[in-house]
Image: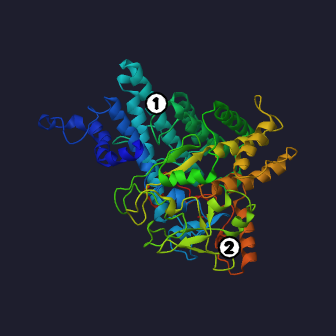
Amino acid sequence: MEMKNNMHKIKSFYTSILLIAIIGVAGSSCDDLLREEPRSFYSSNNFFQTVEQANMAVMGVYDLLGTTKLYGQVVSTIFPTDTDLAQIKGTGDDGSKRSIGHYTSHPSISMFRDAWSYYYSAIERANYAIDNMSKMELLKSGSDEEKATLSQYIGEVKFLRALCYFDLVRLWGDVPFKITPTYVGEELNLPRTDRELIYDQIIADLDYAKAVLPWSSETALNERVTQGAARGYLVRVLMGRAGYSLKTDGQMTRPDNYLDYFKRAALEADTIVKSGEHYLNQSFEEVFRNYAEGKLEPAESMFEIAFAPMGADAENGGFISTYIGPLTHQSSSYGRANAFINAMWPFYDSYALDDARREIAIADYEVKADDSKKYYTKNSDKHKIFPGKWRREWNSSDPLYTNETDVNWVLLRYSDILLMYAEAINETRNDLPGTLTMEDAFEAVRLVRERADQDGWETTLSQDDFRNNMVQERAWELCYEGWRKWDLIRWNKLGEKIQEAGQAAKAIREAYPYPAMDNFQSGKHELYPIPQRDMDVNTALVQQNPGY
C-alpha cells in the first residue's frame, strides 16, 4: 500500500527537510566559500520545486501521526481508557500508563509530554508545508493536473493540521495556537488560546480540504485523506464543539449557540449519506478482519492511520492488536499480544444475546502457546476479558516484532457518520435544518442496527429517549475504537458512566478491580494536565488545567 511503502522513505528525508527553516534564515551571512549548494540535504532554495517534493512534505506530516507517541500506541490505546467499556489492566499507580488510565496522573508523566510534543511537531511540519506549497510556482503556472494535485496536497495537510488541533483541544482544552511556520529568532513562548478560536481554524481547514479533495472512488491513493474523510471529520468536530468541555475555571459548559453546530453537523453528514460514496460492509466481523489483514475498504473505513514497522521498538509500528486484543502467548503462531487493555464484563452483558457485534467486539478467551483458546466467564477467573476487534490471530502478516504490527488504526467509519447524523438530527428536532426529518435519523440508526441483526428503534421515541439510546448504541457499535471517553465528555456523562460501571462490576464480584470508580474527579479528569516540562520552559503558559 502506498502509505506504508512511503513511510520507509520519510525518515531519511525528514532529517534533511527539518533543516530548511534554519538554512533559509541563516544562509545570507555565510562566507562566499560556503555558498556551494549542499548535496546531502535540501535547502529552501531547491526544495518545493516539484510535485514529488511537495508530496514528500505531505507524507512527513502523516509520518508523525503514525508513531507510537501518537496513534501507534498512546492516543489509540492508552488515552481512551478507563471508561465504562474498558480499563488498563493492573491496579497500581505506575507513574505512566496505569496512572493515566486510572485517573491518578500528574503533569510530569512522559506520555503527556511526548504526545504534546509530537502533535506540535506535526503542526509545525504542516504549517511549513502549507506555507511553501502555497508559494510554489507550479501552483500558478503548472499544468492543470499539477495545480489540482498541489491543491489536493494542501487540502490533505490542512486536514491533518485540523486533526492535530482537534486532538489537542479535546485532550488539553485551551492550548498554544499557531498556523504559520517558525523561523530562527521568532518568539517561541505562546500563551493558551481560547478553544473556540482554535475551533474556527479547525473548521476552516476542513472546509478547505473538503472542497479540493477527491472522493475515495475518484483516487487511487491509499490510506490518504479523501473528501469523505474531510466531511466526516468536520461532522465529528462540529459534534465535539456542540458538546460540553471542561473550562479553566473547572466548569463543564457548552457554547450558547451549540444547536447551530448540531445543525451544521446534520447537514454535513447528510451530504455524505446522500453522496452514495460510502456504505456499510454487511458483515461486522469482516470490517475488522480487513483491518487485521491489511485490506483497504474505503466505503466503510473512511480514514485510517497507517503503520509500517521498521524494526523492534521502531517509531512507526503500531501496538494495535498487541495492546488492545485478546491475550496471546508469545510462543503461539500468531506472535505475542500482552493485552494491556481489559474489557468490562458489565459492558459485555449489556449486548443482546443475538447482537452480531458482541462476539466480535469482545473476546472472552486467551490464546495459549499451542494456539488453543482458554475461555473465561465472569465468575471463573477474576475479570479476564478483552477487546476483540483487534485480535492478533486475525493478522495476515508474520509476527516480526514483539509489540509492533502493521495493522492500521481506524479514525472514521461510516457507521460512526450514520450515528452522528442521527444524533445531530435528534438534537435539532424542534428546528430541523434544510429538508431533514426525524425519519432520516431513524433510518440511519436502522442501517447500523440491522447489520447487527437488531431491530431499528420505534419511531415514537421522545427526544430524551432517543438521546439516551444513542449513548448506548454508540458504545455497542464503536467500542474500542478510541471515542467512548470523548463521547462521554461531550455529553457530560463520563463520571456518571464510570460510577455505573463500577457498581455493576461490584455486583458481579465485590473484589472486581476498577480503580477509576474511586479515582475519577469531575471537573478535573475531563482534561489532561499540560506537561510540566512545557509549563517550565514556556513562560507564557501560566495556568495549569483545573485540579492539577
Q: Which of 388 and 431 is in front in this view?
A: 388
Whether label 1 touches label 2, CB < 8 Å: no
Q: Residue at image x 55%, y 67%?
A: 326
* Rendered image: mark on residue 518: 2
Residue type (three-letter) at the residue carrying disc 2: Asp
**Where residue 526 sits in the image (x, y, percent)?**
64, 58
Tag in front: 1 or 2: 1
Tag 1: amino acid:
Gln
- Residue placed at 75% from the left, 51% from the top? 470
- Residue found 43% across the figure and 40% down from its top: 126
**Left or right: where 333 falls relative to 92:** left
The answer to whether 50 is drawn above or below residue 304 in the figure is above
Q: In this view, does 373 lie above or below 282?
A: below
The answer to which of 148 and 476 lies nearer the viewer is 476
**Quadrant housing the C terminus:** bottom right
On the image, numbered disc 1 is attached to which residue? 152
In the picture, measured across the screen, residue 142 lies left or right of residue 104, that is left
Residue 306 in the image: state x and y as whole percent.
45, 49
Which mark sits nearer the N-terminus, 1 or 2?
Answer: 1
